[in-house]
Amino acid sequence: MSKPILTYFSSRGKSELIRIILADCGVDYDEVNVGVWHPTEKSDAFKQLVESKTLAFDSLPSYQDDQILLVQSSSIVRYLGKKFGLAGKDLVEESLIDQYYEGILDLNVLLRSAFTASYPVSSEITNESIEQKIQIILKEKLPKLLQFFERALEGGKEYLVGGKISYADIALFYALDTYTEVLGSYFENQLNSGEELKNLKQLHARVKAREGIQKHLNNPNRFPKQSLPGYEKIAQQLQQ
Ligand SMILES: N[C@@H](CCC(=O)N[C@@H](CS)C(=O)NCC(=O)O)C(=O)O
């Protein structure tokens, strides 16, 4: 059996959760990087891939093993979850894990909307200033969404579903970890604010301590955190 191959641009981006899951499962895989992503200037390596017409949507990441060549990051996450026992023991657990994972994708979309709030079109639609919009997202919508996950872990639950780690727990860990890195003290405060997000904080620590994940996080070759346009503006506003 040949080693699986994860192909992506040279960044964390849409591949990092996949890398963390592979690390947790101890999968020995090769990684192919096709240069830094750019909206118009594509690397030769990426162009060649597109020309080969093997990527279902001409997009990366892709994951290839002996059985499949798969794109769409969430499909890859679910595939690995099912293959390596991180997707529940039956249809009910599988569906609940899927449900929480969708909630985490909502969390990502919400955060991204804070970063893109400065696009003129979004303020035209809502008639709110960029500042108002960011405040609403970060001070009202985000805490509310986080509370749903906090509630899901109530009653001393170690993991979201079935008392066993799943890809949704790992995705939740990575979302929390990313926001802590990107939004600095704001998110750290949210996570540490007394009893309010106690369960999330514990889940974050529990998943972070897993051997394979620790190893990945401490790997000096890990791609650095990304700095997207808008981070600075948001960070400034949160200091106010
Ligand atoms: N829904 C897809 C989106 C994938 C996607 O848009 N990937 C970008 C890189 S992050 C890409 O390959 N873009 C192709 C291009 O720029 O031509 C996923 O989650 O995998």
Image (tube, grey):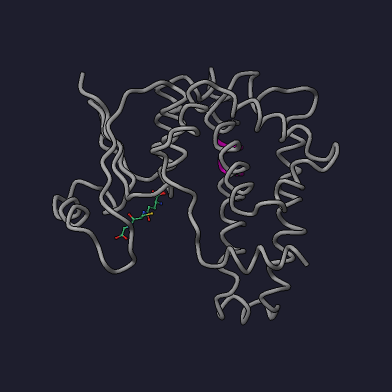
**Residue at (22% x, 59% y) in the render:** 43
Image mark count: 0
Extreme residue in the front direction = 220
Q: Which of 47 and 233 is in front in this view?
A: 233
| Near-viewer residue (84 or 240) | 240
Taking the spot 72% from the left edge, 29% from the top edge, the residue there is 202
Q: In which quarter of the image is residue 94?
A: top right
Residue 17: where, in percent of width, then height?
47, 39
Answer with the quadrant where ligand 1 appears in the image: bottom left
138 above or below 69?
Answer: below
154 vs 15, nearest the viewer: 15
- Determine which quarter of the picture holds residue 104: top right
The C terminus: image quadrant: bottom right
Q: What is the quadrant of the N terminus in the image?
A: top left
The image position of residue 149, as x and y in percent, is: 70, 38
Assess whether residue 95 is covered by the magenta stretch: no
Would you place residue 31 above or below residue 39 in this image?
A: above
Region of the chain picked out in magenta, as a range? 98-103
Residue 77 sits in quarter: top left
Up-down relation of residue 40 to residue 53 (above or below) = below
Using residue 79 as the reference point, say whether residue 144 is left or right of it. right
Image x and y of residue 138, in percent = 71, 59
Q: Which residue is drawn at 66% across and 29% down?
A: 205
Q: Main secondary structure of the magenta part?
A: helix
Query: What residue lies at 24% left-to-right and 47% top-to-bottom?
Result: 55
- x and y, in percent, of residue 151 in the image: 77, 36
Judged left or right of residue 40, residue 86 is right
